[in-house]
Structures are given as structure tokens and as C-alpha cells.
Amino acid sequence: MPLQVVNGAQLMCSFGMAPSSLVVLPANRVLSGNQPAANIMDHKPMVNIMPFAMCMSLANPQVAAATSAASGVLTPQPCIPMTQTPWVPGAPTLLIGNMPAVDNTCTCQCLWAGVVSVVNPGQVTELIP
């Protein structure tokens, strides 16, 4: 069974250079492992999903421009997450704030072609059936 994801979970982007943390605001008032539990709507850039250091995706206009200026040599640029869609697929058996909970198998798509995944769910005691 997958683990429930909470505030402080460690995330990684397929085009990022370093892990990041998930920030879950206590708006839904549901705790798991003494931390606010995440639902699929906790995907907002710079609110819930923090930068992954540098971005290496050529779909990112900043990276494409820097790479072009460097005669085609891939030139990573600072990451600014563009996660505009909710986490998928979500855990339909557990609702938090009337939305499915996020488990450690969920992913979130970045507009710059990266896939954000959960590396560490932030707690190890609560499973989602």
C-alpha cells in the first residue's frame, strides 16, 4: 500500500538538479504523522512546490535561450516550477478537503516537460488503502 504524502515531503523533478520540499498549508486541518496531509490540489508553484535548483529542460524558454546563446551547449537556468495541473492519479479512497489525497505514487506535470515525483512522503506510519 502507498504512503500518504504530507508537508515536508521530498520531491524530485525529472529535469531538476536537486530535490525540493512539498509545502502543505494547514487549510484542510487534516494531520498525518503530525504534519498537514496533502491533497491533489497542493500543486501550486512557489506555494506548494518549491524550485529544484536548476532546470535542464529545453522546453523552458530560459534554458532554450541560454543554450542557444552558448552555441547549443546545454546551459541550465534557475528552476521556476510551472505545475499547473493537480497531482495524478490521487488516492480516491481517502478524501482530504473533498479532494483525493496524494500518495507516494502520484506525479505532477510541469509545463516545461518535467515530471515531479515523490522521493520521500514525509512520514512512514500512515498507509492509504
Image (cartoon, rainbow, N blue to C red):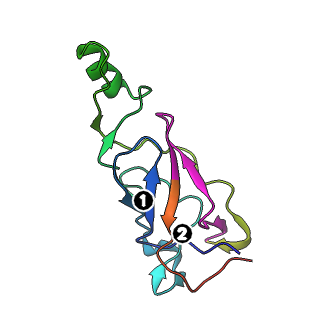
> Which quarter of the figure has residue 9?
bottom left
What is the x, y in percent for residue 16? 38, 45
Label 1 close to label 2 by CB (< 8 Å): yes
Indicate the amino acid at tag 2.
Ala
Q: Which residues are magenta?
A: 97-116
Q: Secondary structure at mark 2?
A: loop
How much space separates mark 1 and mark 2, taking CA atoms?
10 Å
Which residue position holds label 1?
48
Which residue occupies 55% across, 50% down? 108
Q: State which quarter of the image contains the C terminus.
A: bottom right
Q: Are there few (<14), some (14-19), or many (20+) residues within 10 Å of tag 2? A: many
Q: Is residue 128 magenta?
A: no
Image height check: is 52 above or below 100? above
What is the x, y in percent for residue 114? 49, 40
> Which quarter of the figure has residue 73?
top left
Indicate the amino acid at tag 1.
Asn
Which residue position holds label 2?
38
